[in-house]
Amino acid sequence: MKLLKTNWIKTLALSALVAASSVQAGTLEERIADGETIRLGFAAAPPWAYAGNDGSPKGFVNGIAVDVLKRMGHTNIEPVLTDWSSLIPSLKAGRVDMVTGGMYIVKARCENMDFSDPIGAFGDTFVVPKGNPKNIETYQDLIDQNLTMVAPSGYNTLKDAKDAGVPASNITEVPGTTEALAALRTGRVDALATNVLEAKHAADIDENLDMSDPANFVGRDKQVVGIGFRPEDKEFRLAFNKALKEYIGSEEMMATVTPDDYIEAFLPGDLTMEDACKAN
């Protein structure tokens, strides 16, 4: 009996070791070879990325990722919807394989994950009440009038606002875009600081909201966006970049992204991931 119990304990220990190894093991290429799905991690942030009614990955970043993966011969894809602030931790913990949420390539993020080559370049602006009654165009306008703003956790606009001098007490941080828009609609804040695409989308779907003029916004320069990978998946990322190079700006791409408000003016041109990682 004692021998049987000892063998049973050894078997459990071995099983636990194998299970732990399988969770931690391998590159994305090895997971694919084992028949595992490619897990796309994104938050609900239309038109960049969101889940369709059937749970499928929607939005132009997901559309680009899915198209490029198909070109590489990969169709076994699984969407993973999470909070924006959980995207990089989920990638690092191995809960997702790619971050397709639509992240600006900034230095702090480059220190935590690797990015693909740019898939687009965009600027920031504000979502404001209809007619922009307080004439909010810049962070300085918030400071001069002692106004408040909101942004989702992890958005670059939180840091940008603080760097511009907006008091921390005038900045509200929330889990996601839904909560940010709710704060604006209910008058808890005066503006939502976000990217041009999300601002346009919010104004298009809500007649009580407007987008401030992006031409008058003072902040970071036009920022490139990429898809995130773990450093250990370098070979897969390079293969993705090779397929992306042939895809970017193509008729296939534009047919995929146009329904989600991506236009040719957003193409990254000669802007690079390497320069973006160094610049900010």
Image: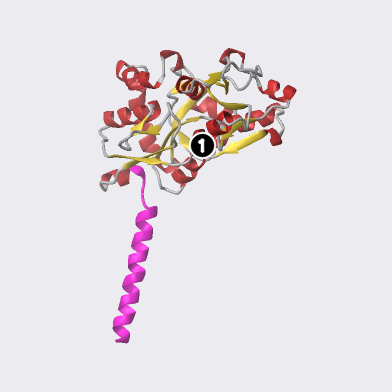
Disc 1: which residue: 176
Q: Is residue 27 part of the magenta span, yes or no?
A: yes
Counting from the top left corner in percent of width and height, residue 150 is at 60, 32
**Residue type, numbered disc 1:** Gly
* Label 1 Cα crowd, 10 Å radius (few <14 / some 14-19 / many 20+): many
Q: The N terminus lies in which quarter of the figure?
A: bottom left
Counting from the top left corner in percent of width and height, residue 280 is at 60, 28
18 vs 225, nearest the viewer: 225
Counting from the top left corner in percent of width and height, residue 163 is at 68, 29
Q: Secondary structure at mark 1?
A: loop
* Residue pictured at 41% horizontal, 47% vertical: 95
Give the extent of the magenta segment: 1-28
6 vs 233, nearest the viewer: 6
Q: Is residue 280 part of the magenta span, yes or no?
A: no
144 vs 31, nearest the viewer: 144
Side of 101 relative to 167 (left or right): left
Relative vertical location of residue 273 with respect to residue 83 in this rendering, above or below: above
